[in-house]
Image (spheres, rainbow, N blue to C red):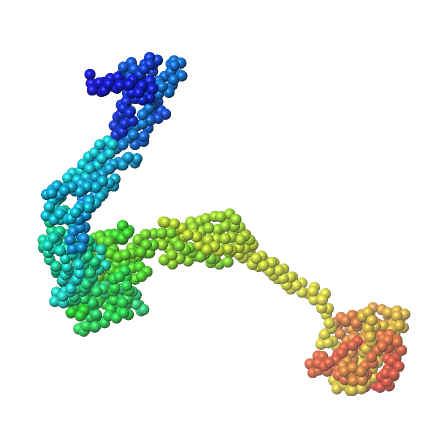
Amino acid sequence: MSMTRIQLLVLTFLAPVLSSAETGSHLMITPQSPYLQIGTNFTATCAITNTNEATADDLYWNLSSNTIPPNQYTKVNESAMAVTIPVNDDKSEWLFCRCKKKTNYISLNSNKFTHGILLTKLYAPEKPKNVTCKVIQNGIQPSSNLKCSWETSGQKNKHNPTNYSLHAQILLTNKVYSVETQEESAMVEMDSFPFYMELEIYVVAQNELGSVESDHLIRDPICFVKTDPPLNVQVIPENTLPRSLLIRWNHSIDNQYVKLRYEIRYSQKGSNVWSKEADVDEIVDIRSFRLQNLLPDSVYNTQVRCKPFQRCSSYWSRWSANVTEKTPETRPTSKPRLWKIVTEGERNNERQLTIICKNPVSSNGKITSFKLKYQTPNSGNISWESILLTSGSKADDFSGQNFTTLKQIILPDDTPVVVYVKAINSMGESPIASLRIPKKARELDPVEKLKVEPRGGQLFVKWTSPNNTAVSEYVVEWMGPDGVNWQKENKSTYQTTIKDQLEKFVCYNISVYPIYSGWTGKPTKVPVYLEEGAPIAGPSVGLKDKADRNGAEITWNEIPPHERRGFITNYTIFYSNGIERGITVPASVNSYMLDSLTANTKYDTWIQISTRVGSFNGTSHSFTTQKYASGEIEMTVVGVCGGFLFVFLLTVALCIYKRDVIKRNLWPRIPNPRMSTIGNWSPDHHLQPETPKENCVSGISILDMEDGKSVSEEDKDIPALKKDKYLSEEHSSGIGGSSCMSSPRQSVSDSDEGADAAETTASTVQYSSVVASNGYKAQQLVFARSESTQPLLDSEENPDVLVAEPGRNTQALSPCFAQSAWNRDDGGFAESNEVEAEPREDPDGLLGESRGQEMLEDRKPFSSYVPQLGGYRPQ
């Protein structure tokens, strides 16, 4: 029989006694409220006592409120049932044993058929590890307090923490010092520091599940001592040793108690890398040391620390305070870092060469000046030119590395040049650096396949060497908004990292120059960003010209480089009239023609600039399309004007074609006096032109007109033909003419005697004209009568309109013909301010009551008039 079964049988016999003595319950669980180790299995047994109402088959188990499955039960006998459960977490729980209610007795006494125990779960105590102890310095000797710490890797109990006890035993005297704690560190207070005696130190961890001890640590107490750092540390430069610094200090503890060894570290100012002197560990109880192989004229930070000399794991003290000192100067031992900047000259076929230089890497002192000379093929021997360094000669301070602009040289494209430079400090001159620039047309081969990419916060540069074995080195140059910088790489290097603190979102132009035995080759350039971002500004948009009816050309400018923050991938043009539309164009485009727009409509447009990281919208611009297309109004006006012009030309052509008809209708023919023939009064009378006399008798007056006609009342009752006859008989004398008072009408016979007379008179037309000037009493009249083959005017054909009406207001004219209408040598009309008036007849011989009589009295006989061209004049 196994030990477990024996225990269960024992518990079965003891259960009635425990039940009757303590609880009065018929069920009893063993063991009672145990402490369980997390990660193990727990077995409990429930026994029935003092009743025959139930058997083991009637029992079941609950863990808290959950029923445990029967497959975890184990039947011990007819009155005992065991259960096995895993302990998985640190949560305390109740385990209950219950009986099924198969009889009324069990139902009525259910509390006697239930029993439970509390399960407390814990982690077993872990063995303390890595026990370390320390004794700090107190004054000039070690302290008597021993502080120790340890580690435990197991999980902690939340509600039942583990207790620790620290024990320190002096082996020589067996004196034990101990202290208890629930932390993982503690301090033991000893009576005094046990010099020259060993200590045994260990830690015990304990809880309800048991206890465990750490490994025992047996050491010399000096190994636990941590001293203060050295005192009064000094760094002394020595002018005779420019590469050395002498360090001195004092002990921090009395060396009769503790022997010390020291460690020194130093670093160049501005560097985070410390260098240590390992040889110091072998020297005991020293108070000075000389650092060697330092850089001249360089500032160093120096610190010292110490610890006990015993060969055990003792503690170093803290580092002493930092001491800064500078090494002495010496002559520069490296060449100046010489470089150039080449730009186009002001004139054609020339270059502007700017020589720039950094201090030598091993300046070994403050560089006070440079010496420079340059040679061209025809320059001959040139002396050195001294260039003093002043504050104004610093061209730039690029990330803390100063470089100096030495000289600017105007160099023809077809001329090579060699530049020599050396640096000078207070102790001497550096080796000579040279730079050779070939002719522009003979620049040497560049590197190939240049690739630059950001990597780890720096720019990584990689290239392929040109197919030329004469390459001696490479120069990597980067140019940004703050200036230019460069670094040199040896000829076997084909990749490097730019050794500079570059900025994000800034475009740098990276160039690699191959150097052929001092001669510079062509550069290969690549623009790159250390890190790209979204633009911080957008372009402003405008119209190139006035918007058309259905289109508008928009333009925009590139934003400044510092606002791009990355390479522009594209532009997106947005325009909206209530409905937004977008068009994407390449980064190289700065204008675009928007078409298919609606006429007479307002549009808002803006440009979105994009990089690989993000985008930014520029300012908006509004415009309104035209109601009419460009040239549409002009074409309409041109068409209308063309139509008018066509009609006008057609009218002019028609007028030219029909000019005779228009002339007859608008401008009737007027008799031309030149075409007249003078009527002869007498066959034997020769016509001679004579100067007209001032006075003659004439019965001519100018009448007021009514409705375009002038007739007398008496003439209204006379028939037209009879009136003509009457006037002809009274005033006419034959074919040729009449007196001054004769009518200008055609002469008509007293009787109608046939066609001959009619033909005779029809072939000639008699007409008279009167020219008047200067008005009443000073008038000058010209009266003429002639025969003409031309038709008469309307006034001549209707002489009755000129007959004065009695009682009408008339103005008598002078009876004198001061000047004949034909009183010109060429037979034309005389130019004078004369008023023409048609002469009229006066049947009654009266032109007025007074003036008519005067005119009759002044009349001269007919014989006093002589014929002339176009009429007669007085003798």
Q: Determine whether, in the image, residue 319 is placed left or right of residue 573.
A: left
Quadrant of the drawing holding the N terminus:
top left
Residue, far front: 21
Instruction: Please state the total of marks drawn on the protein image.
Output: 0
Q: Position of residue 636 (x, y in %)?
A: 58, 57
Q: Which of the pair 599/611 is nearer the observer? A: 611
Q: Position of residue 144 (x, y in %)?
A: 17, 49
Asked if one can make out residue 596 in the rendered structure from this viewpoint, the answer is: yes
**Residue shown at the point (60%, 60%) measured from the top left:** 641
**Residue shown at the point (35%, 24%) measured from the top left:** 66
Quadrant of the drawing holding the C terminus:
bottom right
Q: Determine whether, in the image, residue 185 is placed left or right of residue 836.
A: left
Asked if one can make out residue 151 in the rendered structure from this viewpoint, the answer is: no
Q: Determine whether, in the image, residue 670 is placed left or right of residue 746.
A: left
**Residue shown at the point (17%, 70%) measured from the top left:** 426
**Residue shown at the point (49%, 54%) measured from the top left:** 552
Res. 199 image quadrant: top left
Q: Which of the pair 786/482 is nearer the observer? A: 482
Res. 747 image quadrant: bottom right
Res. 126 image quadrant: top left
Q: Which of the pair 355/424 is nearer the observer? A: 424
Placement of 33 over or under 417, stated as above or below: above
Q: Which of the pair 361/738 is nearer the observer? A: 361
